[in-house]
Image (cartoon, rainbow, N blue to C red):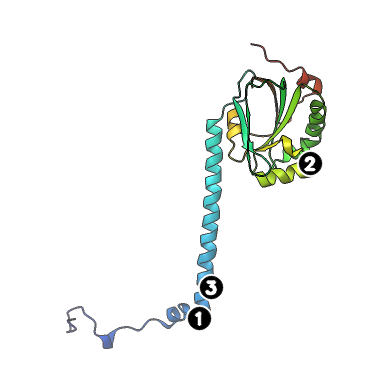
Amino acid sequence: MLDCSPGTGGESLKTQRPMPIGIARLMGGPWSRLLTVAITVLAAVVLVQNLSLLRQINVLRLRAAATDLKLGRQVKRIVGLQAGGGLSRIVFPQSQPERMLVLAISAHCQSCKENHPRYKALAAKIRARGNWSVIWVSRSELESSLTYAAENGIPINELVADPLHETHQALGLEAVPHVIVLDKYGIVQGVWRGNQPWTEDRILAATYSK
């Protein structure tokens, strides 16, 4: 039993202090709803920040794992998603074609969009040659990659979406765009990063020698 005698430190029910009117009002009515909304908004902001942090961590992890794409490096395969969601796998070595033009892009890359007219013209000329093939490897998710292809005249059968960056990591790419020439063994014969100048003749003649 609570000892409410003087000097014991207890407090009888009759002498308990009522809750301040201001606090009582805050706990009910419109203030309660505002407090709920504020907490919900704060939780959403924290969630967005956490997702952004996870994305940055993933980018840093990929950069740490990748190495610079160098002449003479051998690529064993190009893997990604194709239209319809199926898996596309190109394994080296190949009997045909003799050469492959790889255009590494992203649907959200401004430099890719600015350079696309040149890439598209180059791909058309390379495609016309009997001993070459063309592949566009997008590091964006499949839906965005397909939309980008449709808007920019990229043949769907030449597009591979690589949202997990498996192929980009295998190629050693930390950024896009890149223009890459592979031989039928998957050995890098030529590579042009970003806005590095190139010509069709240089790409056609690209040959790696030790």
Which of the marked residues, 2 or 3, is nearer the chain's N terminus?
A: 3
First reached walking from the N terminus: tag 1 or tag 2: 1
Bin the neighbour count of mark 1 within 10 Å (Cα to Cα): few under 14, some 14-19, many 20 and up.
few
The residue under the point 77% across, 20% down is: 204
Question: Residue visible at 67% across and 47% down?
Answer: 143
- Residue 56: image x %, image y %? 55, 43
Outermost residue on the front side: it is: 95
- Horizontal and vertical percent for residue 111? 73, 37
Label placed on residue 111: none
Relative depth, front residue between 142 and 196: 142
Residue at numbered disc 1: 29
Mark 1 vs mark 2: in front: 2
The numbered disc on residue 152 is 2
- Helix, strand or loop at label 1? It is loop
Q: Quadrant of residue 122?
A: top right
Residue 89 falls left or right of residue 146: left
Q: Earlier in the sequence, mark 3 or mark 1?
A: 1
Residue where numbered disc 3 is placed: 34
- Quarter that holds the C terminus: top right
Q: Disc 1 to disc 2, how far (Cα)? A: 56 Å
Q: Amino acid at mark 2?
A: Asn
Secondary structure at numbered mark 3: helix
Residue 187: % across, % down: 64, 20
- The answer to whether marks 1 and 2 mark residues whose Cβ atoms lie closer than 8 Å is no
Q: Given contact means CB atoms under 8 Å apart, are the residues at marks 3 and 1 in contact? A: no
Q: Nearer the viewer, residue 91 or 200?
A: 91
Q: Position of residue 83 (x, y in %)?
A: 69, 42
- Disc 1 marks which amino acid? Gly
Q: Is 63 left, or right, of 142 in this rendering?
A: left
The residue at the point 73 percent across, 46 percent down is 147
